[in-house]
Amino acid sequence: MAKSKTSYVCQNCGAVAPRWAGKCDSCNAWNSLVAEVAESGPPKSLGATKTRGAVLELAGLQSQGSKDIARATTGIGEFDRVTGGGLVAGCAILLGGDPGIGKSTLLLQVVCALAQKNMRCVYISCEEALYQVLLRAQRLDLASAPVALASATNVRDILSTIDQNPCDVLIIDSIQTMYADTVDSAPGTVTQVRTAAQELIRACKKSGTALFLVGHVTKDGQIAGPRVLEHMVDTVLYFEGDRGHQFRILRTVKNRFGPTDEIGVFEMGAMGLSPVANPSALFLSERNAHVTGSAVFAGLEGTRPLLVEVQALVAPAPYGAPRRAVVGWDTNRLAMILAVLESRCGLQFSGSEVYLNMAGGLKITEPAADLAVAAALISALTNKPVPHDMVFFGEVGLSGEVRPVAQPDARVKEAGKLGFAACALAATSKVTRHDSVDFHKLDHVDSLIEILRNGGVAQPPIAKAGKLA
Ligand code: TYD
Ligand code: MG
């Protein structure tokens, strides 16, 4: 007979402690331990029973490999790119994002697109009433799509329904509101979320149903509750963006069936989310090219080149320690670039406040943005605009040297496509000639000062890439 035992589970990291404590030993979060009752007792299989298990049917890898793995595409290009070229039968996808960012809207559009392609789709909404989902579908002009809707929170009910009405795609919005009656904890606790997800994933893998789980995100940007959820699923997608902007970025963090770090760009409008085929043009659309402190970074998100405007502002500090504020980039990295510009190029930022912004609400993590940031900072400090038709990419080291970064060709090609005529990059970059883009190959970050002073003409005069490379 199984005994019930109270243990304390950290709602932040999922660690289990025998006693309550103010602080979790494992992740150091305060006040995160919550009592959860778990059935304990001898495991039902293996040790407890002495009988042998069933003999598994073993199949050869080659015979499996010869099967063509079908992928279901939605026809929403930006979404299909992020999933690695469509959904695989039996895959479990976790979609995380801040509240109100558009997760439900995205999945409703995806599920309707799949339903139009004759896939049997079930959308279980636990957070919204059915008429609210219907209202949204009507607003998005999707009400005619043959999607089965239900509002439920009990995993057992959902699984029996799916058992009787098999489907190809199942959407659970959201996993935090799911309740598995096999465990006693309250909905939303780590044990509940984990158990509910486990049961749903197991059932969907067995039946070959593609499963989407919506997960909320905590203040520090992780999917709420246990990170363990990320280990259980095949693909983790984050839907991010600034609610003040209309752009939304769908990012792959983990993908067992495709590349990671891939992004899809959407625009939220009155008719829901629309895919943005040319995000660089969108991110640069508001740019005023002749303003000081603005430089264009030729970035790379996954396999996709993306041009982003980096904006810097240097203002006199009225009192005390000057402020340094960053939106969309790493604060430590800004401090490093400022230190390099001060000690290696003799520029003075110490008495000024410095603000840095990646326009459009994009978050950049690549060190390749260093050169563009340095250009924007120098431009803001010296009050000289950066040449309007120039893009920048390159990592800046502590001695001020400019280092090459991955895939320069893809970046240059994107810049050329958008009408940029010049590109500043590391001298050691292995880049092939481009017809319409001139290269400014830089050894040291202080060459930027010269480029700005000469309005885009570096000394010695600009050399075509073909001659330099
Ligand atoms: P929602 O999908 O409900 O977000 P989540 O499920 O991530 O919490 O999105 C809600 C937001 O999207 C809300 O602020 C309104 C906005 N929105 C639009 O701007 N246009 C639309 O067509 C729709 C459906 C929503
Ligand atoms: Mg929602």
Image (cartoon, rainbow, N blue to C red):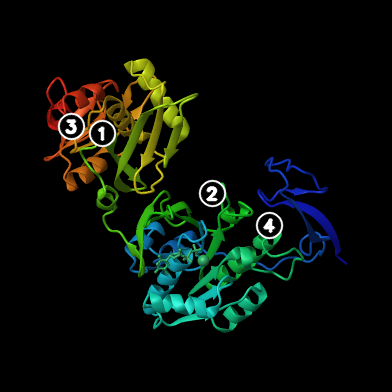
To which residue does mark 1 refer? Answer: 292
State how many labels appear. Answer: 4
Kind of residue indicated by mark 3: Phe
Mark pair 3, 2: CA separation: 38 Å
Mark pair 4, 3: CA separation: 53 Å
* Residue 461: percent from left, percent from top: 12, 23
Q: Residues within 10 Å of mark 3 (few under 14, many from 20)?
A: many
To which residue does mark 3 refer? Answer: 439
Mark pair 4, 2: CA separation: 17 Å
To which residue does mark 2 refer? Answer: 221
* Residue 176: percent from left, percent from top: 62, 63
Mark pair 1, 2: CA separation: 33 Å
Secondary structure, mark 3, is strand
Mark pair 3, 1: CA separation: 22 Å
To which residue does mark 4 refer? Answer: 190
Q: Earlier in the sequence, mark 1 or mark 4?
A: 4
Q: Residues within 10 Å of mark 1 (few under 14, many from 20)?
A: many
Q: Can you say which quadrant of the picture contains the N terminus?
A: bottom right
Q: Earlier in the sequence, mark 3 or mark 2?
A: 2
